[in-house]
Amino acid sequence: MYDPPVPNAPGPGDCVADRYEILRVIGRGGFGTTFAARDLRTGDHVAIKQLDLRHVDDWKSVELFEREAAVLERLDHPRIPNYVDFVPIEAESAGLLIQELAPGRPLDRVLDEEGRLEEDRVIAIADQVLQILAYLGSLHPPVVHRDIKPANLILDDRGEVRLVDFGAVKDAAARASTIGSTVAGTFGYMAPEIVRGSGEPRSDLYALGMTMISLLTGLAPTDLPSKRLKPDFRGRVHCSVAVLDVIDRLIEPVPDDRYADAKAAREALADAVAASALADPGADLGALVAAQERQRRLAQEQREALARRERDAKAAKLAQRPRRVSVSGGAEQTRITFAPIFLSDALLEQLPWGMGFAFVNPGVFIITGLSFLFILALDFGVGVGIVAAILSWAMILFGLNVLYAQLRRRPRYLDLTADGHFALHSGDPRKAELIGRVQNLRVSIPEPDPSKLSHIDISCGHSERVDRLSAADLTTLREALNGRCHLR
């Protein structure tokens, strides 16, 4: 069906939000347009969903748009394109939701170009979607997509699937739909309870079942005859009975009659594939083994992708920590400044020293507490006196730690010259503590993994410790040294 362009919508070559260059139109709706674009800052390709307030009939569309952005921002799954940015709707401008661009073709286009899909491909697709739904259901509160259908599933050349368009999304924090509100979803794929204004994670299982029927038959569910409130599809597909039984249970009109959750449905689908291989002596075992191997490979790749995301998130978190290393100067002389650590960190650093001081100086403990012990023992007993003595000593020790930590809170400076000399300063940038040739200066990094880095040592016969540098600080330091010093 032809969708007319939205008036005043940006076109290819235009720049929106002063950052994104429009490349092409992906799709159009009644109130907005989805574009493929390029991020001018990073060079990445993104998908931009635009909602224009001038073409919205009611505030329900605005609510769904803002809810989609809020939910996407907290999702983290390799089969859901990453959230990038959100530009809220203003009086004279459209709202923008920016996501990572999913590579591949939507499954409805695959059906148009290739016809209905074979059983093994549909099983592989369904297994990946069930992985996504298991993740959405595990969140607190759980997230319900409410619009699972072929058009919202993107299949790439490797057979990997990504779920897009969370425009109908709902979580437990969102208000339930009321009579007269916009029904979110697509008829034929929507579970009956969605039409009635409610929804739960099992509603997405129903939509997945309908999607499998569409992929196996090449027809929309509404184009199939109905039997007992379900599409009558068994005579139109070439599929094992065990897999058909799984689909039948997914599309039960009553939610309680479906699988309890996506994990249970995925296990049932795997059991059905195994049962089909054993029950059908004429089955193509090579194809089944290949399908199972593909599922195992995809699961392994998903685990690796999740591990990479965790590492990237950890590195990004480290990079956001306040910088303690700054660089100034020019080609002739470079000054690297190490800011002092926070007092709280300094106190933690001095805690072992303070405990050792208490143990190796029992005389100080005895002298400090004798007066309290003598006075309090007269009125309250020896036990209270001992407790008071211990507490008084702890307070004195804490005060000494605060004083010592405060005295250590001095910036450190490292000057590097173009002719191969260095000067190391502590506290006063005009007074050098160590001076020498660059080849004698060593920067020791005790932990090769930047994410675990706790300190570095700058030394030239003596050790000068710089504590708790972040990965970003280490990068700054490496760039500043630029081969002038031995970095080990």
Image (spheres, rainbow, N blue to C red):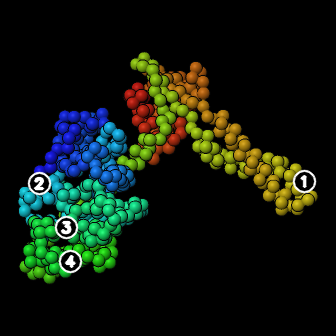
Which residue in the structure is indicated by mark 3? 188
Residue at the spot of label 4: 229
Nearest the eye: 10 or 340: 10
- Label 3: state its secondary structure: loop
Q: Which residue position is annotated with label 2?
A: 1
Q: Viewer-proximal residue, 304 or 235?
A: 235
Marks 3 and 1 sit apart, C-alpha to C-alpha, by 86 Å
Q: Residues within 10 Å of mark 4 (few under 14, many from 20)?
A: few
Question: What is the CA distance from the residue labelled 4 to the residue labelled 1?
Answer: 88 Å
Q: Earlier in the sequence, mark 1 or mark 2?
A: 2
- Residue 56: horizontal and vertical position, in percent? 28, 49
Q: Is residue 23 left or right of residue 471?
A: left
Residue under numbered circle 1? 375
The kind of residue on which mark 4 rests is Leu
What residue appears at the point 88 percent right and 61 percent down from the top-left corner?
A: 380
Label 3 vs 1, first from the N-terminus: 3
Classify mark 1: residues with Cα within 10 Å, few (<14), some (14-19) or many (20+).
few
Q: Picture coordinates of residue 16 (x, y %)?
A: 27, 36
Q: Earlier in the sequence, mark 4 or mark 1?
A: 4
Q: Looking at the image, which residue sits at the far right? A: 378
Q: Picture quarter containing residue 429? A: top right
Residues at discs 4 and 3 in contact (Cβ within 8 Å): no
Of the residues under marks 2 and 4, which one precedes in the sequence?
Answer: 2
User: Label 2 amino acid?
Assistant: Met
Q: Which residue sits at x=12%, y=75%? A: 225
**Element at label 1:** helix
Label 2 vs label 4: CA separation? 28 Å
Q: Nearer the viewer, mark 3 or mark 1?
A: 3
